[in-house]
Image (cartoon, coloured by chain):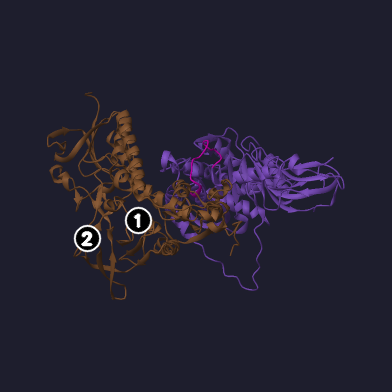
Chain colours: A purple, B brown
Amino acid sequence: MATEIKMPQLGLTMTEGLIGKWKKQVGDAVKKGDALVEITTDKLSSEVESETDGILLAIIAKEGDEIPVQGLIAVVGEPNEKINIAADSPRAEIKAAVKEEKPAVAAPKVTRGRIIASPLAKKTAAKMGVDLSGITGSGFSGRIVQKDVLTQQQNVAAAEVPQAAAEVKVSAPVESADIIKPLTNMRKVIGKRMAESKHSAPHVTLTTEVTVDKTVALRNKLNAKNSDMRFSYTDILVKMAATALRSIPAMNSSIDGDNIIIHDRINIGVAVALEEGLLVPVVRDADRKGLKAICNDTKDLITKARGSKLTGDELTGGTFTISNLGGYDIDGFTPIINLPECAILGVGRIVRKPIVNENNEIVPASMLTLSLSFDHRIADGALAAQLLKAIKGYLEDPDQMYL
Amino acid sequence: MDKDKIKIVVIGGGPGGYVAAIRASQLGGEVTLIEKEHIGGTCLNIGCIPTKALLHTAEVYDAAVHGSDCGVIANVKLDFAKAQQRKTAVVNQLVSGVKGLLSVNKVKVISGLASFVSKDAIQVKTASGSTETIKADKFIIATGSIPVMPPLPGIDAKQCIDSTGVLDLQEVPETMIIVGGGVIGVEIATLFGTLGCKVTIIEMLKEILPMMDGELTKIIRGKLAQKGVDIYTETKVVSIKDNGGEALVTVETSDGKSKVFSGEKVLISVGRRTNTEALALDKAGILNDRGRITANDKMETNVPGIYAIGDCNGKVMLAHIASVQGEIAAENALGHDSVFDSKTNPSCVYTIPEFATIGLTEEKAKEQGIEYIVGKFPFSANGKSLIMGEDGMIKFIVGKEYKEILGVHILGPRATDLIAECALAIQMEATVDEIIATIHSHPTVNEAVREAALAVDKRAIHIPNK
C-alpha cells in the first residue's frame, strides 16, 4: 500500500516548508528513516525521512515549491504499485493552496477576512511586495485599485529613502571567471526575513561603550575554577540580558498585528554563524537559569546548529536575541531585529583602550561596544536605553546582578 | 406639496434629464422636469434611436439582398416610407415608455422653454405663450446639444441638411455628400450606402472616426468602399452651390487640388455644440465657456445647487454619458457623494459590421509612451461569425508588465454588445487572465473576445500565433 509523505510540522509556528534538493529520485528504493528530501522552514533546515520501506513512486513537490504543513510531497510504495495521486491527495489542491498563500508572504500573519482588490492591484502588490491588508481602497465600495497600491508603495519608499536608494536595481557585472551559484534555500529564507524586518520594523540602534574589566575578571575566575566548563562572554551576556529584561519587561516583547505581547518567559536567542548561513537557537528561561545551565544550553545548541540537528522548537519562541561578532574583531554594528521580537543586542570585541578614570588619570581598560536595535513600533528610545543601561551596569559591575 | 422634500428642477428631458429626474425621485426628491419639445430629447427622437431604427432597415435589406447565400431567395424591394413609419413607431413607443416611467416616478413634466431668472428660480415659457416662474432647491441642467452648421459659403442651400433632416428623408436620394466623417457621418453613409445611394464623405482630418483604433478604421473604410462610399480625408469643403436638383460641393483635396462633387443631398455633420443659449446662464451666474457649462466630476457648476450634465457641459457628447452623469447629479443634489469616472466610456459606431471601442487605442498608448502588448483575433476564425456571414477584427491593448486591459477595439458582428464585457473588465481593473479564466459560451461571437485575450499571450487556439 502506498504511503503518502507529507510536509512535517517541525515547530509550533511552522506553516509551510520550502522543498530543497531531493536526495532520492523516483524509482529509488528507500528504507524507513532514509532521508528523502531537504526542507527549509523560516527557522531551520531539515530533512524529510521515509516513513516506510519501499520504492519512491512519485515526487509531488518540486525543489523550490513552498508546501503547507501536511501538504503531500511524495509517495512511497511497492514496486509497480499503481497510485492515484489525484484521488489520494490532489496535487492541484496543494498547488492551489500554495498559490493562495503567495500574497500572504507579503501580508502579515494577521489578516482581516477577504481583501477586496482589483486583479491589477493584486498583481501589482504581489510584484512590489506591498501588503494589501494595510491599504484603504479608493475604488468603488472601498475596492483597492492599482493607484492605491502605488501610493502605498511610494509612502513606504519615502519612509525609507536610504533603503530604497540602496535597492536601485544594478545589474551585477559578470565576468568569465566569476562563480554564479543559485541562492540556497537558507539564504533565501534569511534574505526574506531580514528584508521583511527592515521593511516593516522601524529600526533604531543605540550604542554605548562599556568598561568590562570586572566581567573579564569574572569570566577568568569562573573558567579557572570550573575546569570542566568554558564560559563564553555570550553565556554571561545571555544571563545579564535576561536579568535586565526581567526588570524592564516591556522590552521582552513582540509585535503581533495590532497587539504588543509582553512575554512572561525570557527566552534568549543566540545568533550562530554557519558556513551556509545563520541560525538563532533559543536558550529558554535564561533569567531563571544559572550560568552553568546557560553555558550547557548554548554549547548544546551551537553543536546541534552546526550539525543541522536542531529541532523546530529549539529555534522558536525567542523573545530577545544576542548577536556577538566580537570574535571577528568587530567593534560595533547595527543588528537587524529578529522579528517579531522587539530588540536585538549586538556585541562587539573587547579591546584594551586608554580611558580617563574617576581620578582624571589615563588608565588602560577593557572596553566593549554594545549596540541595541529595537522596533520603534513597540518601544521608544528612552525605554530601550534603560535596558541597554541595565545591561551595561551588569557588565561594569557583575555583582549588581545579585540585587 | 410636501414641505420637507427637496425640490429639484431638471431642465431638459433627454437621456440625461429624464434619468436624472427618475433618480432624484427615487432618492426622495420632489422633481419637476421641463422639456421644450420631445420627452426623450435628441437621443430618442432625432438621434440614436431613429438612426439605429433606419440602420436596422438597412441591415435587413442587406441580409435580404444577400439572402440567396443562405438559400433564401427573394425579390427584394425597398419601401423607405414604410421604414420611416416603423422608425416613428419605435420612437413613439420608447417616448411613451419614458413618459410612463416619469409618471410612475411622480415626476411632474412641464412642456416649455426654461431660462434662469436667478440662482434659485427659472421662468418657463409654454407653447401657449404663458409663463410660469418655478423656484427650487436644486437645478439639474440637461439641455443637450444641437448640430453645428459651419459658416461655409452656400451652407443655406436647400440641399444642405443636418442629422435631423437626414433622418426625415422620405426617399433614398441618388447621391449624397456627407461633410464630416465622424460617427454621425459614417453611420449615415452606412445607412444610405447600403440602400443604394452613392455617398461621398468629405473629412478634414487625416482619418475618419479619429477616436477609433486606426488599424480597425482601415478595415471599415474597406467595407464602406464595398458599398460604393467614397471617402476623401484631409479634404476641406470650400463652398456649396445650389444647382437646382442638386448641390455642387467644391472641395480642396489633400494635395491642394480643387474638386467638385454633386449631391442630391448634402449632410452637414461636422459636430455638435451645446444648447444653452436660451437658458440665460448669466442670470444665475453660471460659469461657462462659449456655452459649455463648466462642471466638475460631481457635475456641480460654480453655483451651489446647480448641476450640469450631458452634452451641455461639453465633456463627452454621448447619451450613455449623459445618463450616468444624470444619476450622479441627482445623487449629489440629494446629499449623496457620487463622482463621475470616465474610465469606462465605450464608444459605438453602427456601421456594418459594428464598430466599438473602449479605453486606449494603440495610437494613444504610443502617444502616452505606455508599454503595451497587442492581442488580435479575426472574426473570420470565429464559427458563429462565419455562420452569420460576418467578419472583422478584435484587438486588445494591454499593459506590458501586468497585462491589465487598457483598451479593446472591436470591428465585427455585435461589437456594440461585445464591448460591455470589456468595459466591465476595465472598470474592475481586470487583466487578460480574468477574461481568459471566464468561460465563454459556444458558438458565439463572444468567443472571439476570449481568443483575442489569449492572443495577447500568444496562446490563441483558433489562429496560428505568430
- Residue furthest toward the right? A79
**Residue holding disc 2:** B150
In the rendered image, the quadrant that contains the N terminus of chain B is top left
Amino acid type, label 2: Pro
Residue A135, position as x, y percentages in the image: 45, 43
In the image, A248: left or right of A36?
left
Q: In the rendered structure, does residue A139 fall within the stretch colored magenta?
A: no
Q: Picture quarter containing residue B331?
A: top left
Q: Chain of mark 2?
A: B
Number of numbered tags placed on the structure image: 2
Residue B227 versus residue A122: which sits nearer the camera? B227
Q: Which residues are magenta?
A: A108-120
In the rendered image, the quadrant that contains the C terminus of chain B is bottom right
Q: Chain of mark 1?
A: B
* Residue drawn at the location 30% of the way across and 30% of the way down: B25
Amino acid type, label 1: Ile
Residue B368, position as x, y percentages in the image: 39, 62
Tag 1 and tag 2, C-beta contact below 8 Å: no
Q: Give the class, few, some or many, for how many residues have Cα within 10 Å of label 1's Cα (few <14, many ≥20).
A: many
